[in-house]
Amino acid sequence: MLRSLYTAATGMIAQQTQIDTTTHNIANVNTYGYKKNRAEFSDLMYQTMQYAGTPTSTTTMSPTGIAVGLGVRPTAVTKMFGQGYFKETGNNLDVVITGNGFFQIQLPDGTTAYTRNGAFKVDGDGNIVNSDGYRLLPEMTIPADVTEISIGVDGTVSVLEAGATDMTQIGQIELANFINPAGLYAMGDNNFLETTASGAPVLGVPGEDGLGQTKQGFIEMSNVQLVEEMTDLITGQRAYEANSKAVITSDEMLQTVNQLKS
């Protein structure tokens, strides 16, 4: 009976992880470039009381054996990098990646971070930056007298300056891709960092070498499906309740034993 208490406790802990993951997804349903998380689990080790194939007589053997499981444990919380839907904004500095790849952002300490959030702005020095003021890499500067900004599907950034009749190219957006994007470290603020598990970034021009193209005037929304998350939330809650009921039942069984009289 004590085994059932601890087994049910592992189930409650696992379902708490499921609910925590699901509520994080729901909280970020409108976060630009957010990628949903998925909690994954595996069963714990088994306590074997009789192995399959154990002789039961001189001519027979146990076909299945007896093994009692000891519960469940979380094994991973995986980022799902499926594409979110695109929202048209009409903003010249909003850019989406239609396919694989990440924008490169320079953090204050010089480290390169990677993001799918293409909601860019221009700072006081004309640099293209994200909402936190971190510069887009490779760096490029928008002249002060610009009347129009154009970003091509191949990432070329061109501007039309006051009094000019032709566009002038001022830079090229370069995308990064990883052999295992799920191995990236999520540091928050829609930014990811390279890890050993993700592999080194492979840089390239949008639209080439398996990288997606860039599209101006759109923003990528979260890839969270609210209906799926609400369903996961309900099933997680019910599973948590079932495991808590198992704890109560085991406690009642122990109480019955303690009340036995000789």
Image: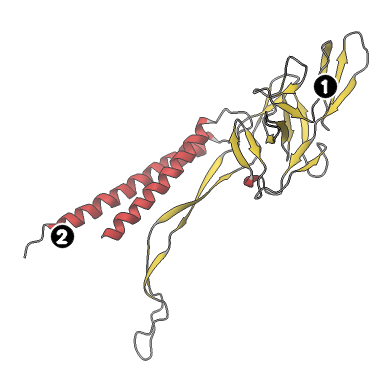
* Residue appearing at x 57%, y 27% in the figure: 30
Residue 34, x across and y down, in percent: 60, 33
* Residue appearing at x 73%, y 33% in the figure: 103
Q: Kindly give the residue lying farthest to the left in the view shown.
A: 262
Is residue 28 depicted above or below 71 in this figure? above
What amino acid is at disc 1? Ser
What amino acid is at disc 2? Val
Q: How many C-alpha atoms fall within 10 Å of the one at disc 1: few (<14), some, or many (≥20)? A: some
Real-space Cα separation, disc 1 to disc 2, in angstroms: 78 Å
First of labels 1, 2 by sequence position: 1
Front residue of 5 and 219 = 5
Q: Kindly give the residue lying farthest to the top in the view shown.
A: 163
The answer to which quarter of the image holds residue 7 is bottom left
Q: Kindly identify which residue carries mark 2.
A: 257
Q: Kindly give the residue lying farthest to the front in the view shown.
A: 109
Is disc 1 placed on a helix, strand or loop? strand
Front residue of 99 and 156 = 156
Mark number, residue 180 = none
On screen, residue 163 versus residue 176, left or right, reads right
Number of marks drawn: 2
Q: Kindly identify which residue carries mark 1.
A: 150
What colouring method underlies this structural image?
A: secondary structure
* Residue appearing at x 62%, y 28% in the figure: 32
Is disc 2 placed on a helix, strand or loop? helix
Is residue 170 depicted above or below 1 in this figure? above
Which corner quadrant holds the C terminus? bottom left
On screen, residue 38 versus residue 94, left or right, reads left
Residue 40, x across and y down, in percent: 51, 50
Front residue of 87 and 77 = 77
- The reply to whether callout 1 and callout 2 are in contact (CB within 8 Å) is no
On screen, residue 155 versus residue 30, left or right, reads right
Q: Kindly give the residue lying farthest to the bottom in the view shown.
A: 58
